[in-house]
Image (spheres, rainbow, N blue to C red):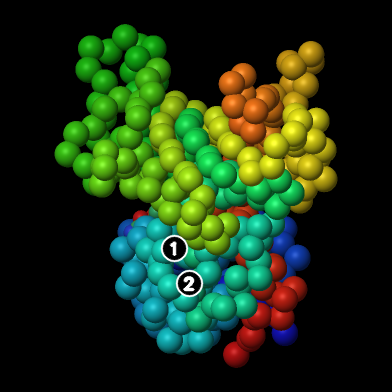
Amino acid sequence: SDYRIAIVGATGAVGTKMKEMLETSSLPIKEVKFLASIRSVGKKISFRDKLYEIEELKASSFEEMDIALFSAGGSISEVYAKEAVKRGCVVIDNTSAFRMSEGVPLVVPEVNKEALRQHQGIIANPNCSTIQMMVALEPIRKKYGLERVIVSTYQAVSGAGISAINELKQQAQDMLDEKTTIEANVLPCSGDKKHFPLAFNALAQIDVFSDEGYTNEEWKMINETKKIMSDDELKVTATCVRVPVMSGHSESVYIELKESDVTVADIQAVLSEAPGIILEDNPDEQLYPQPLNSVGKKEVFVGRIRQDLDVKKGFHLWVVSDNLLKGAAWNSVQIAETMHEMNLLKNK
Ligand code: A2P
């Protein structure tokens, strides 16, 4: 009963991490296939000490596969996820293509794994910023109820892919070399008209602008939070900012609880017991989460927990995680492992 698993977008920032997460996964794996664009055909990739060639993504790629992990962009998922399902694959999709679709579970295993039972072939991996916030807030919501969430993000460049990582490195180099022109062709968003340098800067735009002055990234955090927590009444608003950090998203999260008389110590106690969380909260020791320290770790780090000075039910948290791991590749592989444990996977 071992699985055959394909990675779509295997050469990308997330695809590479999906491979690494599978290498150390508890899933029984009998075969792997690495798919990308025709540009990558023939490139080699190692998996558990064996070399594999990257293959071109085609509908027929999925014929002999049981599970497909997608991370090659929304437009690729829109075309090929259904092709994979038609051929009997379970698709775990890291893009935003199906996240809000009915019948598509949007899952963070620590929060809502029971939603996996409703799947019809496609399971969506939430947005990276949403995932880490859900891991931190769900234990608090379960115990004390959640009335509202106001989040500001400090998001790393690796979330925008390898081209964005390379662009930031080049800009930083050019800035230090005191070049007169700093080139920008990718960020803040490859799909928009203008581009600005990120090096030594902060850009309050992730993805394109949409309704009511919010960007798509901000709408994703708002809508996905309500879907994952199954609470349309929850008040949520977000400001998403790209910062010149390579990996590790940070978030300043303000919450208002339903219950009163909750203390900082209560919240610390809940989070210290919660799955997937490492509490790093000790101002006396200058202990608080940092994106640099989160790189390579699967957990979500939480610290700086404070009560609001004016709102008694209000609390502030600092939430950090490796956006390529819990925010993307690890959450996807964890979904597959969870489905295996729940007996929701079949092999053909
Ligand atoms: P390739 O390297 O062949 O272009 P990132 O998010 O880091 O930019 O990575 C995007 C991933 O999506 C890469 O693995 C890339 O493969 C893949 N990809 C992009 N366009 C296509 C396509 N048309 N068909 C298949 N894979 C694609």
Residue under label 1, please give it: 99
Residue 96 visible in the current orientation: yes
Q: CA distance from mark 2 to mark 1?
A: 7 Å
The verdict on label 2 being within 8 Å of ligand 1 is: no
* N-term mark: 2 or 1: 1
Decide which of 71, 115 is in the foreground and name it: 115
Q: Position of residue 172 (x, y in %)?
A: 39, 20
Relative side of 280 to 257, left or right: right
Q: Amino acid at mark 1?
A: Arg
- Extreme-left residue of the structure: 193
Picture coordinates of residue 190, whole percent (x, y): 27, 43
Residue depicted at 27% across the width and 13% down the height: 179
Image height check: is 74 above or below 163? below
Name the residue type under label 2: Val
Q: Nearer the viewer, residue 48 or 230?
A: 230
At a point 44% along the width and 63% down the height, the residue shown is 99
Q: Image check: 214 left or right of 244? A: left
Quadrant housing the C terminus: bottom right
**Residue that sits furthest to the front in the current view:** 260
Residue 104's label in the rendered image is: 2
Label 1 near label 2: C-beta < 8 Å?
yes
